[in-house]
Image: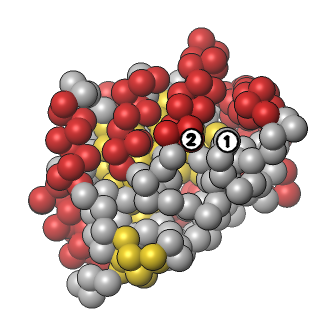
Amino acid sequence: MGKFEAVFGTPKPVIAMVHLGALPGTPLYNADRGVDGLLRDAEADLRALQAAGVDAVMFGNENDRPYEFTVDPASTTTMAYVIGRLREQITVPFGVNVLWDPKSTVALATACGAAFCREIFTGTYASDMGHWAPDAGGALRYRKRLDRDDLLMLYNVSAEFADSLDRRPLPDRARSAVFSSIPDAVLVSGQITGEAARMEDLEAVKSVLPDTPVLANTGVKHATVAEVLRIADGCVVGSSLKVDGNTWNAVDPERARQFMDLARAAR
């Protein structure tokens, strides 16, 4: 817990998502708005989230659908550009996630000085994108080569848009990942973005990993944040803080403020 708490500076942190718009080269990219449009939207969301009092932010490319396992360099470099332009405005710890590419995620974290990163680093899955078999050993060795031993690695052990081909129960897979791959935290997700992890899954994983931070990764809502934080060591939240609770909308400053009021009261 020490390294985790040192980065976030608070028990049970709320990590809020800054979902970038579709990046250059991806099917949903809006060339008329361009990279400047991406920057303006990210800046507005960042300001709203920090004003609401979130404990950390994470920049991700959720709009780059359909997702890839090896991300085009244009995506990673555009994310680095946007984060770099916003860097002086970021007042909380920040992280990154380049879906679904562990090495690009570590590279981006290094380039922009992120404190943490999130990815599917372990496991084998049948997914919407095809057969999914990430390489945790390669990602951690890459972090070592880039001299980022300080970079927190947040392992999502229940992949979205996928079904695990490893038929061991989720708690066993999580425990094994901690033993073999040394994550700094373990994340438990629902089936897709914005869909909650099952509370029984969260409880089961936490029960076998008492000394490892375990966070709820998707679908945490205003009505459930207190129950989630009773079990988990924090949460990642995106959709619930958006206008109408819609993943693809801008951050709603009032919804974000209300969520943080509930989170603070719960912890």
Q: Secondary structure at mark 1?
A: loop
Which residue is labeled 2 in the image?
75
- Place residue 223 in its image quadrant: bottom right
Amino acid type shown at disc 1: Pro
Q: Is residue 233 left or right of residue 263?
A: left
Amino acid type assigned to the residue bearing label 2 in the image: Ser
Displayed quadrant of residue 158: bottom left
Taking the spot 37% from the left edge, 71% from the top edge, the residue there is 132
Residue 48, percent across and down? Answer: 75, 31
Q: Is residue 148 left or right of residue 94?
A: left
Point out residue 104 in the picture as x, y percentages from the top left corner: 40, 42
Residue at the spot x=41%, y=42% of the render? 105
The image's mark for residue 24 is 1
Q: Position of residue 12 (x, y in %)?
A: 44, 44
**Residue 138 in view (yes/no):** yes
Image height check: is 162 above or below 246?
below
Q: Is residue 260 visible?
A: no
Do the residues bearing badges 1 and 2 touch, measured as CB atoms within 8 Å?
yes
Q: Earlier in the sequence, mark 1 or mark 2?
A: 1
